[in-house]
Image (cartoon, rainbow, N blue to C red):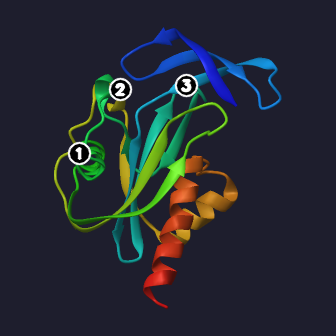
Amino acid sequence: MKSVGSREVYANSWMRVREDDIRRADGSPGIYGVIDKPDYALIIPSDGDRLHLVEQFRYPLGLRRWEFPQGTAPDLADPDPRELARRELREETGLRAERMVQIGLLDVAAGMCSQRGKVFLATGLTAGEPERELEEQDMRSAWLPRAEVEAMMISGEITDAQSVAAYALLLLHERADHS
């Protein structure tokens, strides 16, 4: 598939939506809608058998959801991924990490969105006060035992795809460290 033209149909400080005219491999024309969002950082704060998660209201779902801290930079900025991870962790939880190791990469919805996420494991954590954005004012955070996090994923209480996938990356990272 090859783009032969593109037009922006919507934009705000967090995303752009564009419509691309495409030419398929057989030469036939088509159209593709794409959501462009900056890459995000997802952080798994770990303290042995405990993981730190946040719970917040997710407007598109109309539900409060538990997930790992994650986010993008405002105004479509593209900061250093490790610095973005440190900032998001501090803003959402108040935690500061001595070590921040990238353990994987996730594509949000590759069929419609250009956004990718870098997954970080944060350890050597020090508590502090969160520095939440206005939209995050009702956010809660808590340390949860791994067994409880897994039970919440199985029961459907944790459904954030990025958080579930990031947890799988954590397990694979730990398995690789122990082999």
Instruction: Report whether residue 59 is seen.
Output: no
Residue at 82% of width from left, 20% of height from top? 28
User: Disc 2 to disc 1, how far (Cα)?
Assistant: 16 Å
How many marks are shown on the rendered structure?
3
Three-letter code, disc 1: Arg
Q: Residue furthest bottom?
A: 179
Disc 3: which residue: 35
Determine which of the numbered discs, if any, sits on residue 135 in the image.
2
Check the image and report above or below for 111 versus 170.
above
**Cα distance between the residues tagged 3 and 1:** 24 Å
Q: Quadrant of the N terminus?
A: top right
Q: Nearer the viewer, mark 3 or mark 2?
A: 3
Please report the residue visible at 27 percent of the width from the left and 53 percent of the height from the top. Answer: 82
- How dense is the environment of label 2, judged by Cα within 10 Å: few (below 14), some, or many (20 and up)? few
Residue labelled with disc 1:
87
Tell me which corner region of the image, top left, top right, bottom left or bottom right, holds residue 25.
top right
Q: Mark 2 belongs to which amino acid?
A: Glu
Q: Residue 152, located in which quarter of the rendered image?
A: bottom right
